[in-house]
Image (spheres, grey):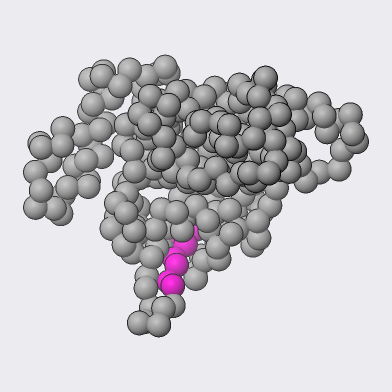
Amino acid sequence: MAEHNGEDKSVDIRGVSKIFTLSAGDLPVLDKVDLHISSGEFISVVGSSGCGKSTFLRIISGLESATAGDVFIGGRKVDRPSVKTGVIFQESRLFPWLSVEQNIAFGIHKKVDKEGRKKLICQHVGLVGLAGFENAYPRQLSGGMRQRVSIARALINKPGVLLLDEPFGALDALTRIHMQNEVLRIWSAEKSTMVLVTHDVDEAIFLSDRIVVMSDRPGYIKNVLDVDISRPRDRSSVPFMEIRKKIYTHFFAESALSLEYYL
């Protein structure tokens, strides 16, 4: 088991199932999910809409409880949210009345003196490339810049695990690619374990060490693919396209649609 900076940042998901109880009856969402994620690993989870990807992420974070099974982070059972696990959502969820540095400062949960607090904020403003925008408000920022603020706020407590739930889904294509490169740079610097939920197969291949392919609801793991391509990755390379084809093969295996149409 790999460890970074002496801290175990591994994630173990053991037999996790989730059933939502609705007025119309029970709705199974996840079915006996088992997965080990090593310290410092970058994992992406892909699957069709409604397969339970976001619920899976919320259970890892402690924001949602499993109906059955357990999650362990660093060997400790997850039963509530923790500052050691950061979460970034699709929407930036910033406070519009706070500046960039005030929004980032809101994420500080550990005891630190005034000077240490100022230093932390400055470090994380620089980490996400927002130096010069400390006093700007969310309405004055682009979508990509707002997501950078969210990333800085999530990282400021040095979480061992960072969970990303479609964080770039609302961005334009060029900004999305830029943010993907930024996340890789931050991951390399921070050595966090990262788990990304995405609908974008190319994004998953570009970022991940491994890709988890989920079935339709109730979601279970159909396959886990290693991405044995050195970084930085060329999206037009043959190895990249081969992995893309493997993933789409899983998606279309039970579909009447033609796989060739999408490749």
Left or right placement of residue 216 versus residue 11 in this view? left
Q: Position of residue 253 (x, y in %)?
A: 16, 49
Q: Which residues are magenta?
A: 13-20
Q: 149 or 224: which is nearer to us?
A: 149
Q: Position of residue 40 (x, y in %)?
A: 57, 33
Q: Magenta-highlighted stretch: main secondary structure?
A: strand
Q: 121 or 191: which is nearer to us?
A: 121
Residue 152 lies in quadrant: top right
Q: Is residue 19 magenta?
A: yes
Q: Residue at x 68, y 44 (%)?
A: 97
Q: Position of residue 43 (x, y in %)?
A: 45, 39
Q: Residue at x 66, y 24 (%)?
A: 133
Q: Residue at x 77, y 30 (%)?
A: 120
Q: Residue at x 61, y 49 (%)?
A: 73
Residue 25, relative to residue 33: is it above or below?
below
Left or right placement of residue 187 versus residue 225 in this view? right
Q: Is residue 25 magenta?
A: no
Quadrant location of the C terminus? top left
